[in-house]
Amino acid sequence: MSILPSNKPDTSHILGIDYGESKVGLAIGDSETRMAFQYGTLKNDKNLLQKLAEIIEKENISKIIIGVTNLETRFPSPARSLGNSVSKLTNVEVEYQDEMFTTRQAQRNLIEKGAKGIKKFDDQEAARLILQGWLDKNL
């Protein structure tokens, strides 16, 4: 079952990704609400692409936003490689969003909310910030 407020079966969603060497944070939102929500964290292992493909199908994802640093926007990077691979596998469009300071801001947000286990949730909060930034800028 989807965590999103819209219960329309034909509503498409947008997936935000904060790529890391060991963990990949996920957030989900849509153009109707223009709000991003934390979704989860995946291990960055050999099953990552398959797990992403399953989420993309389950949540009816129509676009993927992946955070990259300013330097990565000009040069190949692991985040861009992931974007290319997931787009080829799922035929879903991928765009890139600057992720400058999102992890630091995510940790601050979690501290302010009194969250326990900040390291457990900072990747998905960073993904939420990346996606929310894209939604604010593009919709």
Image: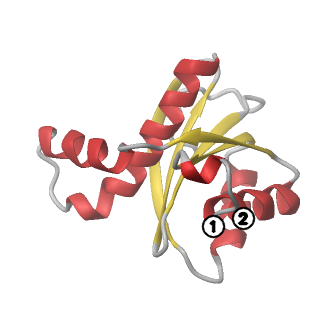
| Residue 100, horizontal then vertical, whole percent | 42, 43
Q: How many marks?
A: 2
The three-letter code of the residue at mark 1 reads: Pro
The one nearer the camera, 22 or 27, is 22
The one nearer the camera, 107 or 99, is 99
Which residue is the extreme one toward the bottom? 46
Side of 126 where 48 appears, left or right: right
Dots 1, 2 in contact, CB < 8 A = yes
Residue at 54% x, 75% y is 44
Side of 71 where 23 appears, left or right: left
The way the protein has been coloured in the rendering is secondary structure
Quadrant containing the C terminus is top right
The answer to which image quadrant residue 38 occupies is top left
Crowdedness near tag 2: few (<14), some (14–19) or many (≥20) residues, C-alpha within 10 Å: few
Asked whether residue 1 appears in the rendered view, the answer is no
Q: CA distance from mark 1 to mark 2?
A: 5 Å
- Give the numbered dot on residue 78: 1
Q: Is residue 34 above or below residue 74?
A: above
Residue at 87% x, 60% y is 88
Asked whether residue 120 appears in the rendered view, the answer is yes
Residue at 73% x, 33% y is 12
The answer to which image quadrant residue 80 occupies is bottom right
- Give the numbered dot on residue 101: none
Question: Disc 2 on helix, strand or loop?
Answer: helix
User: Which residue position holds label 2?
Assistant: 81
